[in-house]
Each structure stands twice: as C-alpha cells, then as structure tokens.
Amino acid sequence: SGSPVEVRNLTYREACLVSESESRLLHIELEGDSDGKVSLQSTDTGSKSSDDWRLHCDASLHPYAPEPRPVVDLAQLQRHHDMHVAPQTYYSALDQIGLNYGAGFRNVRELRIGEGSALGRIRLSDDAMRVDAAMHPAVLDACLHLFPAATGEYGDFSALADDDRSTFLPITVERFALHGDLPAEMWSLCRLRPSDAGDQEDGRYTVDIDIFAGDGIPVASLGPDHQKTYPC
C-alpha cells in the first residue's frame, strides 16, 4: 500500500549457507498487506513444492507512524567513545572470529569504542551496486557490524588471543523502523544492554542500535537485538 511499516520479532531460524559453486533460489513470502507475516525461504531444487523450501527467518509487519525523536549530540558521543580503531584493523580481526565481509560490505569508515558501546561512521563505497530500497542492505548490515566492538571483549582489536576466537550470530530482532530520509553518510550507535549473570555465562548479548545523520537527526532504530556467541 506504500504506507510506512515497522518490522517486529524478526527471528533467525536457520542460516542460509551457499558455497561458491552452489546456487539457491530465494523466496520472500508476505501474508497479508501492511500488517502481516513475512518470511525468507530458499531451495536448491527449483521445485515449487513447499516441502522443498527451507525457512531461514520470519517477522511480522505493522503500520508505523514516525514520531519526533530527540536530536543526538554527536560531538558528545565522540568524546565518550575515545578508543579509535582503524576500519582495516577491525575487519581483519572480524575475519579471525568468523565474520567475513567482502569488500562491498566493509562500510564502517570510522570506529570509536566506549564503555559498553561503539560508534561508527557508515558510508557505501562510490561504486556500490544501487538498489531500489529505502535503506541499502549493505548500509544496514554495516550498522550491525559494530556489535563485537560494543561487547568490550576484544580491546582495540590489535591482537586476538586464541581463546577470543568465538563469533556472534543474531537470534532475534524485536523491532526495526525507519524514522526519516537516509543521507549518503550516517552514524550508528550500538549500545550493549546490561545482562544478568546467566545470560553472560551463556554467551548471550542484547544491544540497541540507533542510526542518525551527521547533524544528529535520527533516521532509523533497531532493537533489542539478541545475539549469541559460538566457537569458531
């Protein structure tokens, strides 16, 4: 219908693993219109039978009316995030913990780390493939790349110990919504929520992600985002 919607209760059911020599058909199914369930499925058989399709994630869509949000003080956030990590160093470290991003997805251009949070400047490369979407998937993906930095588990990422080599995978995202027009360059703030001891021992983390323009105007938010660590 063209009306704004927000995504709620996005749940990752099964990873979609595709080797370099393999191809898979992807299918997005929407039940209802602006207030229904959406799912992502895949198959490697080309069959139209529902028995041959595997469910990877699902979510529900709900009508959304953007509300005014306070402007973010970017200068203050930068002062509170005083540990600088070069993007090349960061992505090299992510490679070591099993988060391997290709050149077209390495869109964190500046990274600062604070206590329980990470702040990143996000921008697509000039030669990135253009898509007809309100938010480029590679931009949204880059906003999520800050999570390992927010945990505080890896310091400045200059050297990883062998026992640090565990990776992070999302489990659920409770809510995602766009609040305004997206600029070419934006900032992502990833904040770690306090967890009880049981969650920490089980390797579970919860974060909130706020995305805003350089002038501090909010453009999107995501969270709570629940992640879990797994050995590499």
Image (tube, helix red, strand yellow):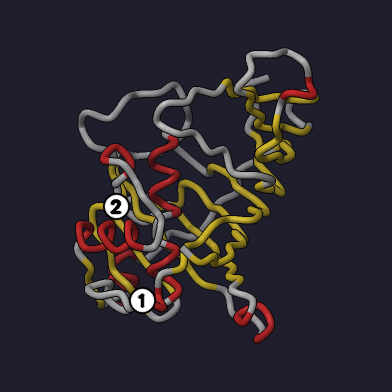
Sort mark 2 into few (<14), some (14-19) or many (20+) by Cα contacts within 10 Å: many
Left/right placement of residue 72 relative to residue 10 reads left
> Which quadrant would residue 73 be assigned to in this image?
bottom left
> Please, is residue 169 above or below residue 25 in the view?
below
**Of residues 204 and 114, the one drawn nearer to the viewer in this rendering:** 204
Left/right placement of residue 190 relative to residue 63 reads left
Residue type at numbered disc 1? Asp
> Please, is residue 219 above or below residue 74 in the view?
above
What residue occupies the far front of the structure in this picture?
21
Q: Residue at x 44, y 44 (%)?
A: 140
Residue type at numbered disc 2? Val
Name the residue that disc number 2 marks: 108
Q: CA distance from mark 2 to mark 1?
A: 25 Å
Q: Residue at x 63, y 53 (%)?
A: 173
Q: Residue at x 53, y 52 (%)?
A: 221
Q: Where residue 76 sits in the image (x, y, percent)? A: 32, 73
**Of residues 207 and 54, the one drawn nearer to the viewer in this rendering:** 54
> Which quadrant would residue 148 be assigned to in this image?
bottom left
Sort mark 1 into few (<14), some (14-19) or many (20+) by Cα contacts within 10 Å: few
Query: Circle 2 sits in a helix, a strand or a loop, which is it?
Result: strand
Q: Where residue 30 sits in the image (x, y, percent)? A: 73, 25
> Please, is residue 36 above or below residue 102 in the view?
above
Name the residue that disc number 1 marks: 162
Chain-order first, disc 2 or disc 1: 2
Q: Where residue 110 sits in the image (x, y, percent)? A: 24, 58
Query: Circle 1 sits in a helix, a strand or a loop, which is it?
Result: helix
Left/right placement of residue 191 relative to residue 66 reads left
> Which quadrant would residue 141 be assigned to in this image?
top left
